[in-house]
Amino acid sequence: MFIIKAKKRDAGTKLDTLRKGGEIPAVFYGMKKETTAVSVSTVEFKKVWREAGESSPIKISSPSGEIDALIHEVQVDPITDEPIHVDFLVIDMKKKIQVNIPLEFEGISGAVKSGLGNLVKVLHEIEVEALPSELPHNLVVDLSKLATVEDQILVSDIKLPTGVALITPAEEVVASIVLQVEEKEEAAPVDLSAIEVEKKGKKEEDATTAEESTPA
């Protein structure tokens, strides 16, 4: 199991100062535990987050002892994409929990390869229920099953590990193919200035004709 060390964080601690010092402000809560403010090493957290994701249980080593938890929510900086705050959800390893598991798409759709249509990914995660120790890191979706434009991959088509039960409705579409639409050739833009010049020239021509036809 992944382990991350957490330091107790005082309420008055300036978060920017904490981040500049290589720490991420965080909290853990759940299982009737009081919400506790902590901080974790930025480098250590990013490594655990990359390997465990948000569906694999981890251990938080805190001053009050070790706690089983999930990385529940991560706030990231919109510019740097770096984590700036973390919520850990405390769990009981002996009780089943419901978690969203990310989908990993692999393989090549025959319909896309042949140019028949475009791939549409409808879902990127599905909800399941299992003991924390039996939760998968991700679930694989085989796109090679999409051979024609009529083909679809449903939630029920995803193979679940033993001990994992589906919560997301089985009939929901995960991925499908839409017909390739040929782009219509755009009409050439109308030159309005040429039209104005042409109208102006015709008015002058009509005026000249009128003058010539007027008796002296």
Image: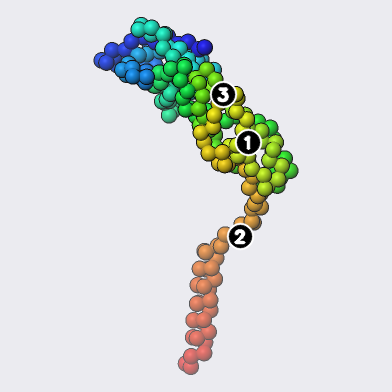
Residue tagged 3: 163
Q: Residue 2: percent from the left, percent from the top?
A: 50, 12
Q: What residue is at 61 percent from the left and 60 percent from the top?
A: 187
Q: Nearer the viewer, residue 95 or 26?
A: 95
> Disc 3 or disc 2, which is closer to the eye?
3
Local packing at callout 1 (Cα closer than 10 Å; few below 14, some 14-19, many 20+) is: some
Colouring scheme, one of rainbow, by chain, secondary structure, one colour: rainbow
Q: Residue 122: percent from the left, percent from the top?
A: 56, 40
Q: Residue 118: percent from the left, percent from the top?
A: 64, 44
Tell me, yes or no, if residue 39 can be seen here.
Answer: yes
> Disc 1 or disc 3, which is closer to the eye?
3
Sequence-earlier tag: 1 or 3: 1
Q: Secondary structure at mark 3?
A: loop
Sequence-earlier tag: 2 or 1: 1
What's the amino acid at mark 2? Ala
Q: CA distance from mark 1 to mark 3?
A: 17 Å
- Tag shown at residue 187: 2
Sequence-earlier tag: 3 or 2: 3
Q: What residue is at 60 percent from the left and 39 percent from the top?
A: 154
Q: Nearer the viewer, residue 163 or 191?
A: 163
Figure check: 204 above or below 16? below
Residue tagged 1: 157
Q: Is residue 130 left or right of residue 16?
A: right
Q: CA distance from mark 2 to mark 1?
A: 45 Å
Q: Secondary structure at mark 1?
A: helix
Q: CA distance from mark 3 to mark 2?
A: 59 Å
Figure check: 174 above or below 48? below
Q: Nearer the viewer, residue 151 or 161?
A: 161
